[in-house]
Amino acid sequence: MPLAIERASLAATILPQPTSIGDSLYKHLERFGSRPVRAIQRIRAANIGEADAHLLQVATGSAGLHIERVSYLSTGRVIEFTRSIYRGDTYDFVAELRLGDGTTGAQQP
């Protein structure tokens, strides 16, 4: 069963031969010292359009989660922009927030 559609965009200078990726984009990027170290991700509920519904094997208009992510290198350079669509009937997103007490040096979200 298909669970999600992910569409990632990277500069040709970062990924000159996209067909050489293999199973994992991030493992490939790490090999060349270009693995992202942080990202900002936005998640929203939305109905799935006809073409994507066909690929995900759900009815057009089904509930889904649309995710947009911008990933960054340690230098602050944007390396990746990703748009994903997840089936709403199969995903449950959980996030852990660490809020440090101000004395441990923990970063605030």
Image (tube, helix red, strand yellow):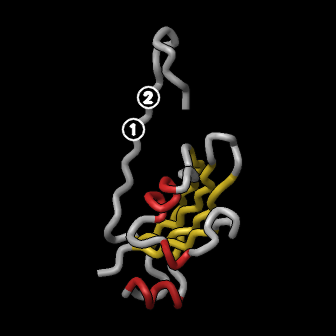
Which residue is at the far top?
Answer: 103
Instruction: Locate the N terminus by quadrant.
Output: bottom left
Query: How would you rate the neighbour count of disc 2 (Cα within 10 Å): few for under 14, some for 14-19, many for 20 or more?
Result: few
Instruction: Locate the C terminus by quadrant.
Output: top right
Which residue: 63% across, 55% down?
70
Residue 68 at x, y percent in the picture: 59, 61
Residue 38 at x, y percent in the picture: 56, 44
**Residue type at numbered disc 2:** Arg
Q: Is residue 21 left or right of residue 80?
A: left
Distance from disc 1 to disc 2, alpha carbons, whole Å, reads: 7 Å
Q: Are marks 1 and 2 in contact (CB under 8 Å)?
A: yes
Which residue: 69% across, 42% down?
76
Which residue is at the far left?
Answer: 1
- Considering depth in this image, is 6 or 54 the residue closer to the camera? 6
* Residue to which mark 1 is pinned: 96
Q: Is residue 53 above or below residue 85?
A: below
Q: Is residue 29 above or below residue 107?
A: below
Residue 20 at x, y percent in the picture: 49, 74
Q: Is residue 94 above or below residue 90?
A: above
Circle 1 SS class: loop
Q: How many numbered circles does the render carry?
A: 2
Q: Is residue 47 left or right of residue 56?
A: right
* Residue to which mark 2 is pinned: 98
- Residue 35: assigned label: none
Query: How would you rate the neighbour count of disc 1 (Cα within 10 Å): few for under 14, some for 14-19, many for 20 or more?
Result: few
Which residue: 49% across, 53% down?
30
**Residue type at numbered disc 1:** Glu
Which residue: 69% across, 53% down?
78
